[in-house]
Image (cartoon, grey):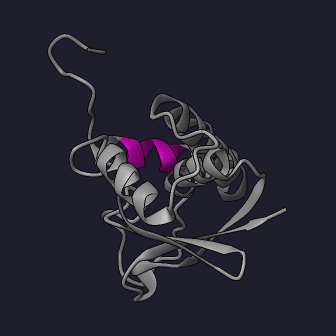
Amino acid sequence: MLRQELGEFSSIVCFKSAIVGMEEALGEKATAIALTAAGRSRGKNLAQELGLAEAEIPFDVLADKLNFALGKDGTRLCKVDKIVEENGIIRAYTSETLCSAGEAQGSNRKCTFTMGAVWGVIESVVGKRLQGKHVESVLQGASHDVFEFTAL
C-alpha cells in the first residue's frame, strides 16, 4: 500500500487542479505534451505489469484487460469500452475519462494523460511506435472520447 491510511487514490478535483496550475505556469501546449508523455510512460509500465508487452492478443481482449486495470476495479482513470482496428488505424473508445470529468459541454479540453496511458499500452502490445490523436470528445457531443493511433 502506498499510504497507510489514505490508500492509493486521490480526487479528480486535485488532479485537475494540478493540470490547470501546469497550464498557467507552462502554457497549454507544453502541459499537453508533458501529460501525454507521462501517460505514455504509465501505459508502458502498465503493459509490463500486466504481461501485455508484445503479447499477441485480440483488441477486444486488450480492451477488457485495460478496462479492468483502468476502470472501476482498477485505478479509475477511465472506462475502456472497446478497441478496434480498421485499415491500419487503431481506435480506442473510452468513457468517464479523468480529463473530461467536470468539464462543461462544448469545452475544447483534450484527454492528454488518459490518451497517453492507453497509447503506451497499445504501443507496447503491438510493438510499434504509434502516433496518437484525440479524435472524438464527449465534450463535443460524441458518445465516447476516441483516441486514434496510426503506425509511424
For this view, does 112 lie left or right of residue 81?
right
For this view, does 125 lie left or right of residue 94?
right
Q: Quadrant of the C terminus?
A: bottom right
Q: Residue at x 46, y 41 (%)?
A: 18
Q: Residue furthest right?
A: 152
> Visible in this render: residue 93?
no
Q: Quadrant of residue 86?
A: bottom right
In terms of depth relative to the viewer, which is nearer, 103 or 26? 103
For this view, does 107 lie left or right of residue 69?
right
Q: Is residue 48 magenta?
A: no
Q: Quadrant of the N terminus?
A: top left
Above or below, 108 against 9 in this view is below
Above or below, 82 against 4 in this view is below
Q: Is residue 17 magenta?
A: yes
Q: Which range of residues does the magenta coloring cover?
A: 15-21
Q: Residue furthest front?
A: 56
Q: Residue furthest bottom?
A: 141
Q: Main secondary structure of the magenta part?
A: helix
Residue 91 placement (x, y as % from top left): 56, 73
Q: Residue furthest top?
A: 4
Residue 94 placement (x, y as % from top left): 41, 67
Q: Residue at x 19, y 10 (%)?
A: 4
Residue 137 placement (x, y as % from top left): 47, 78
> Visible in this render: residue 8?
yes
Residue 8 placement (x, y as % from top left): 27, 26
Q: Residue at x 53, y 38 (%)?
A: 47
Total number of numbered discs in the rendering: 0
